[in-house]
Image (cartoon, helix red, strand yellow):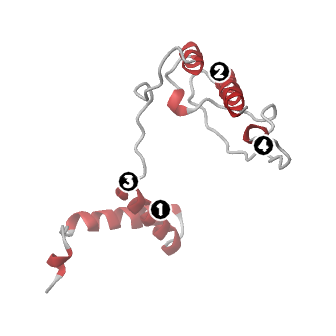
């Protein structure tokens, strides 16, 4: 029963992606995040959202994969090894550090130009300061 529900979800997802690729073939559109209404009486997780009312856009990671190849992947004719997908960087320590810096800039400054200046000054300061590999170098 669960396998059939999963296959149904895969097919529904593939159909929505293929339909979205037909509407937005280039994939270079600005997406608006609209949170759909959740149906709490749904039987399975696919039924939580009314998929007919959702305006779907093709996922960026599948932009260069054709609709025919996508159908083959879903049907199991082509193995999905992950090599066909675009490589996106994941959450790294450097990215988390930058998110922290932007958050700090929002709390300490007002206006986009001031925030930009704060971020640039902080990055420049970090580049000029020596970086220590271990805490033992901080000792005086």
46 w.r.t. 75: above or below: below
- Viewer-closest of 114 and 84: 84
In the image, which is nearer the foreground, mark 1 or mark 4? 4
Quote the CA–CA distance across marks 1 and 4. 42 Å
Q: Nearer the viewer, mark 1 or mark 3?
A: 3
Q: Secondary structure at mark 2?
A: helix
* Mark nearer the N terminus (1 vs 4): 4
- Judged left or right of residue 136, residue 105 is right
Q: Nearer the viewer, mark 4 or mark 3?
A: 4
Closer to viewer: mark 1 or mark 2: 2
Q: Is residue 22 above or below residue 45?
A: above
Label 4 element class: helix
Residue 59 location (% of width, % of height): 58, 32
Give the residue displayed 42% in from the left and 47% down from the top. Answer: 90
The residue indicated by pointer 2 is: 18
Mark closest to the chain's N terminus, 2 or 4: 2
How far apart are the alpha carbons under marks 1 and 2? Answer: 41 Å
Say which mark, if any, is on residue 48: 4
The x, y position of residue 45, in whole percent, is 73, 42
Query: Dots 1 and 3: beta carbons under 8 Å?
Result: no
Q: Residue at x 53, y 27 (%)?
A: 62
Q: Which of 62/113 is in front?
A: 62
Q: Residue at x 67, y 30 (%)?
A: 3
Q: In which quadrant of the rendered image does the C terminus lie?
A: bottom left
Q: CA distance from mark 2 to mark 4?
A: 21 Å
Left or right: 62, with 136 as reference point? right
Q: Which mark is residue 113?
A: 1
Residue 48 position in % (x across, y down): 78, 43
Instruction: Tell me the number on the disc at residue 92.
Output: 3
Dot 4 or dot 3: first in sequence order is: 4
Location of residue 42 with respect to 13 vertically, above or below: below
**Residue 135, above or below 51:** below
């Amino acid at each position: 029963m669960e396998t059939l529900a999963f296959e149904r979800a895969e097919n529904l997802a593939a159909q929505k992606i293929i339909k979205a690729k037909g509407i937005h073939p280039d994939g270079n559109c600005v997406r608006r995040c609209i949170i759909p209404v959740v149906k709490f009486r749904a039987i399975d997780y696919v039924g939580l959202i009314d998929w007919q009312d959702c305006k779907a856009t093709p996922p960026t990671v599948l932009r260069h994969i054709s609709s025919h190849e996508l159908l083959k992947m879903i049907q199991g004719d082509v193995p999905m090894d992950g090599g066909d997908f675009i490589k996106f960087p994941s959450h790294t320590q450097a990215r988390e550090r930058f998110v922290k810096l932007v958050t700090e800039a929002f709390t300490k400054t007002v206006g986009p130009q001031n925030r930009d200046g704060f971020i640039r000054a902080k990055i420049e300061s970090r580049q000029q300061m020596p970086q220590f590999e271990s805490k033992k170098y901080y000792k005086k």
